[in-house]
Image (cartoon, grey):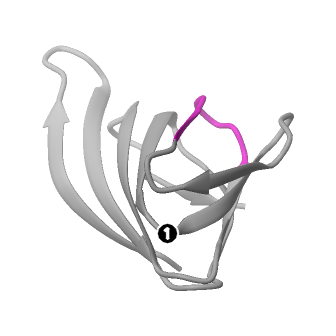
Amino acid sequence: MPTLNILHRAEFPGDSYVSVLVLIEASPGEAVPQHTHPGLEMTYILAGEATFSVQGRPDQALKAGDWFQVPADTPHSIQIGDTPARALGHYVVEKDKPLTTWL
């Protein structure tokens, strides 16, 4: 499993959502199994390469400088390439639910 370090968390006043900024680090060859989030995910690749799979779309090759977006509750997974990978993930999710649900 990748290492997730929460860098910042901010709740929206009077709302049921929270914004979470996460540094994601994964080892070479690591597989991030299919999972969902209870809100929008926007992730920017800082280093490394990966193959991104999301339900209903063709696989996407990612490298440093690329980004992806996943709608709420959409199953997706990632296969890390031959070098360590780092990414900055930003989530706008329901604050009373877990950030990630593994399928």
Q: Could you say where residue 61 lies in the image, as x and y percent from the top left?
A: 70, 53
Left or right relative to 6: residue 48: right
Left or right relative to 74: residue 41: left
> Could you tell me which residue is drawn at 51 percent across and 38 percent down?
38
Q: Could you say where residue 8 lies in the image, as x and y percent from the top left?
A: 15, 48
Image height check: is 94 above or below 32? above
**Which stretch appears magenta?**
67-75
The local crowd at label 1, few if under 14, some if 14 to 19, many if 20 or more residues have their Cα within 10 Å, is many
> Could you tell me which residue is drawn at 72 percent across and 46 percent down?
75
Image height check: is 15 above or below 62? above
Q: Nearer the viewer, residue 28 or 35?
A: 28
Q: Which residue is mark 1?
A: 48
Q: Nearer the viewer, residue 40 or 48?
A: 48
Q: Nearer the viewer, residue 14 or 50?
A: 50
**Callout 1 secondary element:** loop
> Could you tell me which residue is drawn at 42 percent across and 46 percent down?
44
Q: What amino acid type is highlighted by mark number 1?
A: Gly
The part of the image, by quadrant, that contains residue 32 is bottom right
> Could you tell me which residue is drawn at 18 percent across and 22 percent down?
12
Image height check: is 33 above or below 44? below
Q: Nearer the viewer, residue 33 or 16?
A: 33
Q: Could you say where residue 33 lies in the image, as x and y percent from the top left?
A: 69, 68
Farthest residue, direction top = 14
The part of the image, by quadrant, that contains residue 28 is bottom right
